[in-house]
Image (tube, grey):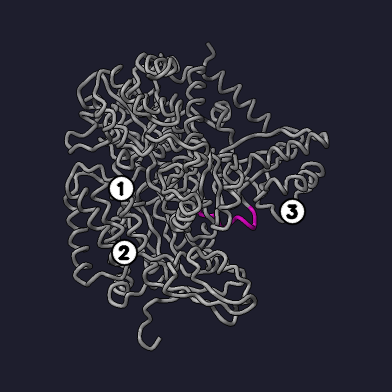
Amino acid sequence: MMDAKFDAIVENGLQKKAGLIALLQEIQDTYGYISREAVAELAKKLKISESHIYGVATFYAQFRFEKPGRHKISVCKGTSCFVMGSSRLLELLEEKLDITSGHTTPDARFSLEAVYCLGCCAISPVISVDGKVFGNVTPKEIDKILKKYDD
Amino acid sequence: MMEFDEIRTKAIEKWEALKHQEGVVLYYGAASCGRASGVLSTIEEIQDACQQNELAVKFVETGCIGPCYLEPLVAVQIDGNNPVFFSKITAEKARSFVDQVLAHNDLERDDKVGSLSPETNTLVGERINSAFEIQVRNVLRNCGIIDPREIDHYIARDGYLGLQKALSMSPDEVIELVLQSGLRGRGGAGFPTGLKWKTCRASPGEEKYAICNGDEGDPGAFMNRSLIEGDPHAVLEGLAIMAYAIGAHKAYLYIRAEYPLAIERLTRALTQMQDYHLAGENILNSGFDLDFEIFQGAGAFVCGEETALIASIMGKRGMPSPKPPYPATSGLWGKPTTINNVETMGTIPNILRNGADWFKQVGTEKSPGTKTFSLVGKIQNRGLIEVPLGTNIVDLIERVGGGIKDGKVFKAIQTGGPSGGMIPAAMSELPLDYEALTQAGSIMGSGGLIVLDADTCVVDLASYFSSFTQRESCGKCVPCRIGTTRMLEILETIKAGKATLQDLENLKVLAKTVKNTSLCGLGQGAPNPILTSLKYFEDEYLAHVEKRQCPALVCRDLIRFEINQELCNGCGSCSRNCPRSAIEGEQKQVHEISQELCIQCGRCYENCPVTAIYKTNRYPSEGD
């Protein structure tokens, strides 16, 4: 069962005639991800099938189905970042955190994902941690950045 | 309720007061790029220092003026003189900056860039002239100059006069004016904007929709983000004019979720419009009603395609549908709909205010006006620029861009993102207009320009784009779904040095088939990076296939790392960093890499303090 907050999101969304995507965004903003329970509950409330919701949600890169870690690292894989060497940054992070992109470390400290363009191409390669963008990142700086998020 | 004229008079007073303020005003560029470069910490430091020294300074936040490579960029206006810009003012430099510039009004510093020219909205000064000389800032006229959170700043600089003028004309007259201007959609395909509006207006139905496409999915482009962050009202004014012209009473802004600041800016701007009766019912007492809604795109490149974008707003998977019917006749909820790109919208108010002839003053006959580009990659001056259409590539690279980074050799420029192509250095006289780019096998696209130097492998880059389009293919049509996967596989084989000449031939045939038979622009454009690189850099493909060599020394399976015995000082940094313990050597003795163990990760190469490690062909040609 989801909580009262969840009911409020759906209630509010339906009132504003928000579409399915806007509802899923709101749920993810609140809980950090789209859980199985959330999908089941939402399906009931909207009177549509769970598979319909998954069909839509998995189509879009934004939605996560795994509980995220305390800190979210996004490595930009936009063209400019790619040309300036971001693949190497992603590879290093995967190695250091011992997870592949799209996953969370067992201690739940970091989630790692590759994103297509944060729009900061002029200071590429960039990575962002919890929304804070680091520009012109070199492989050597990765350790220093990770250390800032020690908790 | 205040009349618009009164609002405008007050706004002008406010703006003029700021521009002529006695004492010091400090402007700082705080768009996403400026923030990423740390401008907010800089400002915090500066504010602290000002407080300690009891300096009265007025702070004004702005968007990005363009040269992102100089960020954090701050500008100082003293006693109403033109603001003077300073580059790379990091938090560490803040105190010395306050002491010299703000406390003693001494502007002569090494990091002084130039001053703002109020006539052209560009920067002038020895250091910056070449970057701005050929730029014409029409769409970006307010970016980096006004506070994007202040509607009064926008109005003081003739904002919403375009809308006011449009509302005094009939919708057909507005459409005629836009047709006259020759404006072509800035999203990529270059379809005449006026014609799009005309078709939608002519479509039967009371209910119509206006949509501004801010999905900016091209990875490596950020023009739309910058424009929204720096001048959100320009986009909203354009959208309101478009809605009026086609007869819509509901307008959507489709903005990608990766742009939180842009969404924040638009949300605030919309509230301000409501307050000034520029949105909602009876706009400017004209009887015209228009409601706005922001829709956050959830991350799918294909949603840049009109029919897919519409499906997405309706809460479905963003899959395109065959055209016709075009959105102009049957779009959102089956109603006539017009979709225009952010930059197209930003251009419209200027055309309404200044007329069609003014717009046609720059650009070419078939591609009039200016275009914004994000000039990035291996170039000195990376940033957001605006130049007349038809400007040639070499001028962009040499003048605006200041040449290739680190003095290396210019190899090619990628235009149009994953649906575009690579134009080789030999064609650098090519003008950037819709026709010339299409003829060269690329497209204009939304304006991403990625500069490549000799260290970029075209096969690797083509494979990067293919992996992107393969991933983003929605899967609806077979040519795109299977074709992009097969193209990627062949490219991977070439990169691994395992391809045959037949594979290369297959790739060509496949690419042409995918281009000709895919349902939407994603599939039709996906082969372009491959086709153009094959056309202009066939030698490089052949080197991979026939000699198993990567001329740019990028493809890992074809290179090896070596240690230069003359340079190695035996510090051991490489062996400590090697994840495979592939490097051995006594302390202070020359080290050696075991090629059997090495996985070419490059960590030793990145960490060598004396650059003794170098890349070379794994399979050298005879006689090498």
Q: Residue at x 49, y 39 (%)?
A: A108
Q: Position of residue B229 (x, y in %)?
A: 51, 36
Residue B454 visible in this rendered orientation of the protein: no
Residue A64, compared with residue B95, is above or below; it is: above
**Mark 3, residue position:** B109
Please indicate whether residue B315 sits to the left or right of residue B48 in the image: left
Residue type at mark 2: give it.
Answer: Ser
Residue B533: mark in rendering:
2
The residue identified by callout 1 is B471
Spatial distance from mark 3 to mark 1, Cα to Cα? 49 Å
- Please state which of residues B547 and B160 is positioned toward the viewer in this rendering: B547
Q: Is residue B2 above or below residue A150?
A: above
Gap in Å between the C-alphas at discs 2 and 3?
A: 45 Å
Q: Chain of mark 1?
A: B
Q: Classify residue A114 as left or right of residue B311.
A: right
At a point 40% along the width and 48% down the height, the residue shown is B219
